[in-house]
Structure formats: C-alpha cells, structure tokens
Image (cartoon, helix red, strand yellow):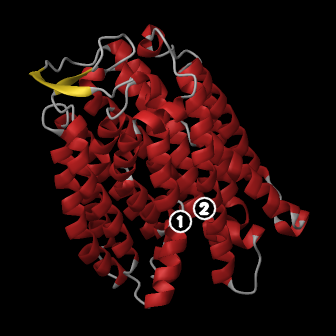
C-alpha cells in the first residue's frame, strides 16, 4: 500500500476532547514504567554489580552490570517485531495488556531476587533472564503508545505524542524522586544492601496499578475501521516502506544517544568518576527532568502549527552545539551541576518533544505499529543500549571525562541529517491523507 503523503491544504487544529485525552493517558502508562525501570537500573547499577557480579576490580563489576542493561536492549528489536506484528494483525489492546503484565512481574522478581552470595551463579543468570523478558516486552510499549496517540488524535498528533513522552519523563522523574528519597532515608550501607530493591518493588506496584487502569482501554478506532490487515506487517514494511524505516531510525537517533548516555550512564558516572554526592546527583537529575518535561510539551504543541522537520532541525542543531561545552564544565567538577544539567536538558527538549510525532506519521495505519517499533528499537538498541559501555570505553581510551559528549553529538548529527528526508512526510500543521482513498490509510 502506498505511503501516506501530506497535503498542502491547511487544516484546523481542534482541541483534544476528553475521550482522546483518556486514550492517550492510558496508552502512556507502559512507557512510564519502561523508563522508570531503565533509570532505576542505571541509578543503582553500582549496587547491583556488587551483589550479582562480584569481582576483584570494582570497575569490571560495574561493566558486567552495564552489560546486563545492554542485553535487555538487545532483546528489544525482537520484542518489537513480535509485539508490533501482533498489534498490526490482531489489535493494539491485547498486546498492551500482555506486555505490561510480563514487565511488571519481571520488575517485582528482580526486586526479590537473592544475590550471588545466596544463589551463586544462578543469581546473575536469573537476572539476565528477567532483563531479557523486560526487553522483549518493552520493545513494543512506547511504539504502541505512540501508535495509539496518533490514531486517537491525528490532527493533534504533535501534542498527543509529546504528552506520551512527557509521561515517559514522569516515569524518569518518579525514579529520580525514589532514588532521592532512598538516599536521604537510608545510610549508604543500607542502600547498597536492600535500598535498591525497594525501588524495583515500587516499580512492580506501579505496574499493577497501570494494568488495572489499562484494562478499560478500547481498541484503536483507526484499527477497527481498517477493511484489510497486513498478513505479514514486517515484510510489507520492508518491501514498501524501507526508506521510511531508515528515516525513522535517524529521527530517533537523538533520543537513543542522549537518553542512553544521560540516564543509563551519568548517575553512576557523576558519583563514582566525578565524585559528586549521590544526593546532589539525584537533585540535578530531577531538575533536568522538570526542565525537559516543560520544554518538550511546548515543542510537541508547536509541531501542530509549524513544519515538524524544521522544529527537529533547530532542536538537534542546538544540542550539537551545546552538549560538548556543557559536558566539559560538568566533567571539570563545577559547583553548578544542577544548572548545567538543566541547560543540557533544555537543549534536548525541542528534539525530545517533536521526534515522536514525526516518526508516527511516517507510516500508514496498517503497518504503523511495526514501522514505529522497528525504527525506534533499532536506534535505541544500537545507540542507547550500548551508550554506557561506549562511554566507559571512550573515557578509558582517551583519558577525557568529557569524551561521552562526543557520542551524543554524533547521534544528534544523525537526527539532524534525517530532517532533510523526513520533510517529505512532514504533516506539520496540515492533515495527513492517504494516497489511496481507503479507510485504512491515515
């Protein structure tokens, strides 16, 4: 089926009604849990390393712990392919419910898993298995949420998708607040012993509440209106929309590089390598999240009125210019860590708020879930999953604590380049219409 193309006719931008907000809100719950779990693991990686990967060298132990994080990301493309195929063939709702259940159970089990000292080799093996299950399930969570958002509010997909990312940031913010609370409430020895487990168990509780709420989610109206469904969405996607997949991976590169580095690597890096205090680090991360959240929702809103590819181009260009000098100040041990982290997140906020609506509008309804999942998971797996390992290697090779900033700049350059291809499918303030007049097109 031909890919949707934008018209040049201006379209109205109506307000989102209560039903649309409800669907968008329920769809966002899984993405919030996804990033909560991701951030919690990164924050407490040093403690997890000591309990499950004991080694004579603390650096080696931390590398092994980050490797488990990377393995979870390796499973995401497989999970994204499987879940998005099911979502495009049988519906978004059953996939959403099933993946959330598996993710929640895995998070709870990680919080209860005995250490290496108790179970021996079985402990790290079980941890790896649970992270793989999470990776498989979460490979379809955020892509599914974006699919729901753009199908629930096609004329306001910029704001709708921006709200999804805002809720993802809420998950990160909750993780940061949990870390801050644990660091203040418990002495360092207790945090290392059992405090980190409280964070995972709380994530499991959040997952249970999310499931109870998500059960009332209806099927996507655009999916129900389709007259025919793709028998093999991935095959159709690669045959007819391969260029959109490549463009989408480039659009998501900035979020893969930035989030993977900032949230998967920086918390432990600030404390262990740069010797900032855990409480100061947690406060800086929380401030950065608040600034980023405010900025990204504005960027998503602007994307419903201005050409989205131009908004993304400005945002990615700004981040490329800002990331190295800001990171260098942080690496030098600045006493303005909170301000610098806020400025770095503000530079990222424009790209963070606009990339999801661009990505969602690259694909027609019948393969949208699969298209978003494949593009997004390729970038996240390659650029975000290995960011902590890449950062450690870059610092070790160059001897420069600010070397990871170059990694973020390179990923952002990929996004900047993708804006020149994405403009061909840029909905901007106009409405996406199908090249064929059929109900299954957007």
Q: Alpha-carbon distance for marks 2 and 1? A: 6 Å
Measuring from the top left, give residue 61's x and y in whole percent: 69, 77
Look at the picture and state if 283 lies above or below 28: below
Badge 2 crowding class, 10 Å Cα cut-off, few under 14, some 14 to 19, many 20 or more, is many
Count numbered badges in the picture: 2
Q: Quadrant of the N terminus?
A: top left
Q: Quadrant of the C terminus?
A: top left
- Label ID, residue 386: 1
Q: Secondary structure at mark 2?
A: helix
Q: Earlier in the sequence, mark 2 or mark 1?
A: 2
Look at the image and tell me whether residue 322 can be seen: yes
Measuring from the top left, give residue 226's x and y in whole percent: 44, 11
Q: Is residue 308 left or right of residue 90?
A: left
Which residue was labeled with disc 2? 70
Rendered residue at 81%/60% (across/down): 125
Task: Evaluate if marks 2 and 1 touch, with contact meaning CB atoms under 8 Å apart.
Answer: yes
- Residue with the most extreme right position: 119
Q: Is residue 54 left or right of residue 404?
A: right
Q: Is residue 15 left or right of residue 20?
A: left
- Label ID, residue 134: none
Q: Which of 188 and 418 lies nearest the eye of the viewer? A: 418
Rendered residue at 67%/52% (across/down): 198
Rendered residue at 53%/65% (across/down): 386
Measuring from the top left, give residue 51's x and y in whole percent: 76, 69
């Amino acid at each position: 089926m031909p890919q949707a193309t934008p018209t040049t006719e201006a379209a109205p931008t109506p307000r989102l009604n209560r039903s649309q907000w409800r669907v968008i809100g329920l769809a966002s719950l899984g993405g919030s849990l996804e990033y909560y779990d991701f951030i919690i693991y990164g924050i407490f990686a040093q403690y997890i390393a000591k309990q499950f990967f004991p080694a004579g060298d603390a650096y080696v132990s931390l590398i092994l712990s980050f490797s488990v994080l990377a393995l979870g990301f390796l499973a995401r493309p497989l999970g994204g392919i499987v879940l998005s195929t099911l979502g495009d063939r049988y519906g978004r709702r059953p996939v959403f419910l099933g993946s959330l259940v598996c993710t929640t159970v895995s998070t709870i089990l990680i919080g209860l898993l005995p250490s290496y000292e108790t179970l021996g080799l079985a402990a790290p093996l079980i941890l790896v298995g649970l992270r793989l299950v999470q990776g498989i399930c979460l490979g379809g969570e955020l892509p599914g949420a974006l699919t729901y958002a753009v199908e629930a509010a096609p004329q306001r997909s910029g704001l709708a998708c921006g709200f999804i990312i805002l809720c993802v940031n809420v998950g990160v913010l909750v993780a940061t607040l949990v870390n801050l609370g644990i660091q203040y409430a418990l002495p360092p020895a207790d945090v290392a012993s059992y405090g980190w487990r409280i964070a995972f168990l709380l994530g499991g509780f959040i997952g249970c509440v999310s499931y109870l709420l998500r059960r009332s989610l209806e099927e996507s109206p655009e999916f129900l209106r389709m007259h025919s469904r793709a028998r093999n969405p991935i095959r159709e996607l690669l045959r007819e929309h391969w260029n959109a997949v490549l463009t989408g991976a480039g659009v998501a590169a900035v979020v893969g590089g930035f989030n993977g580095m900032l949230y998967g690597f920086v918390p432990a890096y600030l404390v262990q390598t740069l010797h900032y205090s855990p409480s100061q680090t947690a406060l800086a991360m929380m401030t950065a999240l608040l600034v980023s959240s405010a900025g990204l929702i504005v960027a998503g809103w602007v994307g419903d009125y201005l050409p989205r590819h131009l908004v993304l181009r400005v945002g990615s260009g700004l981040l490329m210019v800002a990331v190295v000098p800001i990171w260098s100040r942080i690496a030098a041990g600045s006493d303005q860590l909170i301000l610098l982290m806020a400025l770095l997140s503000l530079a990222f906020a424009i790209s963070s708020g606009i990339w999801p609506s661009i990505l969602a509008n690259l694909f027609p309804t019948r393969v949208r879930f699969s298209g978003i999942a494949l593009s997004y998971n390729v970038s996240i797996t390659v650029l975000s999953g290995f960011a902590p390992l890449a950062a450690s290697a870059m610092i070790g090779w160059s001897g420069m604590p600010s070397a990871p900033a170059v990694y973020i700049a390179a990923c952002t350059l990929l996004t900047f380049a993708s804006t020149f291809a994405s403009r061909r499918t840029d909905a901007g303030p106009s409405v996406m219409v199908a090249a064929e007049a059929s109900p299954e097109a957007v």
